[in-house]
Amino acid sequence: MCGIVGVASTAPVNQLLYDALLLLQHRGQDAAGIVTEQERKFFMHKAKGMVRDVFRTRNMRALPGNHGLGQVRYPTAGNAYSEEEAQPFYVNAPFGIVMAHNGNLTNAQALRRDMVERNHRHINTDSDSEVLLNVLAHEIGRAGQHGAWSTEALFAAVAATHLRLQGSYAVVALIAGHGLLAFRDPYGIRPLCIGRGKDGTVMVASESVALEGTGHDFLRDIAPGEAVFIGTDGQIQSRQCAAQPRHYPCVFEYVYLARPDSTLDGISVYQARLNMGQTLADRLRLQVPLDEIDVVIPIPESSRPAATQLAQLLGKPYREGFVKNRYVGRTFIMPGQAVRKKSVRQKLNVIGSEFKGRRVLLVDDSIVRGTTSREIVQMAREAGATKVYMASAAPPVMFPNVYGIDMPTRDELVACGRTLEEVRQSIGCDALIYQSVEDMKRAVGSLNPALDGFEASCFDGVYVTGDISSEDVGRLHAQRNGAEEDDACSSRLALPNSTDA
């Protein structure tokens, strides 16, 4: 998961890009980068850290030009500690191209070998995004016969790129002297949308909140497999570049990743979370006597809509029992279990009066590693709660995600290879209630019946691209951790060619 933005304007775009990245900061806190173009020359600044720390006044002054793009990164491939892997990436031929990418290529290793051995292109980092850029650059050069330029050749290059790439990708790229290119993988796994300002500025971004928060009108989502090109004259051209596109957006965007004020693929994230609260309430009624619950308390912040809806439907008081320190990063994004565990109590503090002597129902958006949940349950007990129930608005996270979410290893997932009772004991709550996979898909999918389904592999083990096997999952695990794959969930991995929603 990363956040990307691209802008084509008739005015300087450095401040606009900065503002958009601030609105996308929730999508990545590891590194940030901006590149602008002026008179066919690129100006770039990128570094590890948050947007506000990476860009100082002197950096902004060094980013002139009316076209540009940016990215906030949270690493799911490559080296999380390498500043060289901050994006955007640059290649000088053909024309000069800079690119930012959100997603994860599942065949990056094979592509890297292909780039070096067959296409004779140099890959300088371990990032799959640099591999993607070189594939795109090679195909643009080949489609344009290594010199000629046309939008027809550009769209042909994107079509050829689709044929070589596997996995998830939403991409923005600047082609020196020609314009801004954006495209999305044929399954539409990672989000991408386009908007226009009153002055004619065109912006492409991961979430609609980046458009609306910078004064741009939302036009539409970029379709799976589609490429959009904004020329230097501001004209928008688009083309479907995939032979058989299908629409399977990542359901975890609605569960947790996206901001609640965004609309992705025709679905309000906020309404999706309200709907998940409703179906969770129905499920909870069957598992916990309602007279055993005194108060409903959300775990900030993504769970608030679901918790609000659940409390209203159950007729129980809704209370804020945790105060969040906004200056501590999201624990889900933080690399390293020790850092993640330590940060929970730095991030959250209890309001003791809301717990003392009460039977509390804690609502979270999801339970991934269980570390945060375990600490929070303990905090609630220390604050005086007589019983602590835990409800998750999402189903158990049972399988690794290979499409750009930081849960690629099975041994990190608390629900993997454990029964519900074993997970409850691990977390330490008195009762544990999960959403069902079917209810989650129905709650979100009812808001846009035109979708083919959802990429929900971390919940159901179905990898919608149809090219992921249990061996691939093990290989991706080994690449990331340098360790042998834990086979606790191997027998439960669904067939990779299934795309049932």
Image (cartoon, grey):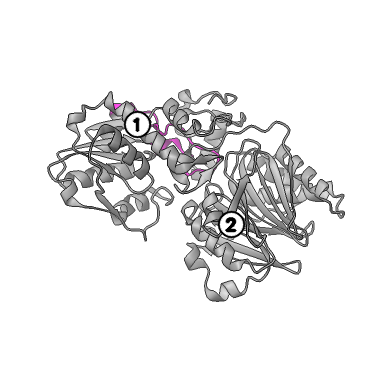
- The one nearer the camera, 120 or 460, is 460
Label at residue 280? 1
The magenta-colored residue range is 395-421
Q: Quadrant of residue 240?
A: top right
Q: What secondary structure is found at the residue carrying circle 1? A: helix
Label at residue 216? 2
- The one nearer the camera, 404 or 355, is 355
Residue 406 part of the magenta-drawn span = yes
2 or 1: tag closer to the N-terminus: 2
Disc count in the image? 2
Q: Position of residue 276 (x, y in %)?
A: 40, 34
Kind of residue indicated by mark 1? Leu
Kind of residue indicated by mark 2? His
Q: Position of residue 385 (x, y in %)?
A: 16, 42
Q: Are marks 2 and 1 in contact (CB under 8 Å)?
A: no
Q: Residue at x 34, y 36 (%)?
A: 392
Q: Is residue 384 above or below residue 7?
A: above
Mark toward the viewer: 2 or 1: 2
Label at residue 145? none
Q: Position of residue 445 (x, y in %)?
A: 50, 31
Q: Residue at x 31, y 51 (%)?
A: 344
Relative placement, left or right, of 455 versus 235 is: left
Q: Is residue 91 above or below residue 296?
A: below
Relative placement, left or right, of 351 versus 406 is: left
The prevailing secondary structure element of the residues shown in magenta is: loop
Q: What secondary structure is found at the residue carrying circle 2? A: strand
